[in-house]
Amino acid sequence: MAKASASEKTLQDLFLDTLKDVYHAEKQILRGLTKMAKAAESDDLRQAFEHHREETDQQVQRLEQVFEIVGKRAQGKPCEAMQGLIEEGKEIMDEFKGSPALDSGLISSAQAIEHYEMARYGTLINWANELGMKDAARLLQETLEEEKKADALLTKLAESAVNQKAAA
Ligand code: FE
Ligand code: ZN
Ligand code: FE
Ligand code: FE
């Protein structure tokens, strides 16, 4: 089948495009979380990153299941937003290495990433429902819940010891 011209593109096409974007983003996040876990000063923060990295492995697999549901090959499309967020995270790691504010910086970078993901998954769930793909919506919802929990845990860590240390 010929590639649809812009005027013929549908919500289904938009869904697939965004799925590819998130697939690429999650794969970048896998590497990002590994680096952030290594950089973290506090044990709690390192464990949070390691735990979310394991969840992210599952999230990549869920996305592959969603590609299967739509009958398409799992394929990423470079997510410039996530590349930028990861890049900012690296800057923080370099510029605040060895400083008491490092963990606060890592948390802020990680939360920006989680919020991007929450926006993306929220949209995908909406569209999956719109398109009548209940199983896809359910898989995406599972991931959204993990992203929300990861974000909430980071907020908790930010409010506890980590920032007190940075402010001292
Ligand atoms: Fe994720
Ligand atoms: Zn993305
Ligand atoms: Fe993107
Ligand atoms: Fe996440």
Image (cartoon, rainbow, N blue to C red):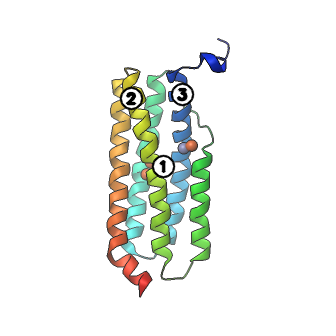
In this view, which residue lies farthest toward the front?
7
In this view, which residue lies farthest toward the top?
1
Dot 1 lies on which element?
helix
Residue type at mark 2 is Ala
How far apart are the two marked residues, 3 and 1, measured between alpha carbons? 17 Å
Report x, y in % for residue 16: 53, 28
Residue type at mark 3 is Leu
- Determine if residue 37 is in view: no
Report x, y in % for residue 142: 33, 40
Q: Is the residue 142 above or below the residue 11 in the image?
A: below
Marks 1 and 2: which is nearer the front? 1
Q: Is the residue 14 above or below the residue 119 in the image?
A: above
Residue density around tag 1, few if under 14, some if 14–19, many if 20 or more, within 10 Å:
some
Q: Residue 85 occupies which quadrant of the picture?
A: bottom right
Residue type at mark 1 is Tyr
Q: What residue is pinned by disc 1?
A: 116
Q: Nearer the viewer, residue 26 or 126?
A: 126
How far apart are the two marked residues, 2 and 3, measured between alpha carbons? 15 Å
State the residue at coordinates (56%, 31%): 17
State the residue at coordinates (54%, 82%): 98
State the residue at coordinates (37%, 20%): 132
In this view, which residue lies farthest toward the bottom?
168
Report x, y in % for residue 46: 42, 68
Q: What residue is pinned by disc 3?
A: 14
How far apart are the two marked residues, 1 and 2, measured between alpha carbons? 20 Å
First in sequence: mark 1 or mark 2? Answer: 1
State the residue at coordinates (44%, 30%): 66
Dot 3 lies on which element?
helix
Q: What residue is pinned by disc 2?
A: 136
Q: Is mark 2 within 8 Å of ligand 1?
A: no
Dot 2 lies on which element?
helix
Q: Is mark 1 within 8 Å of ligand 2?
A: yes
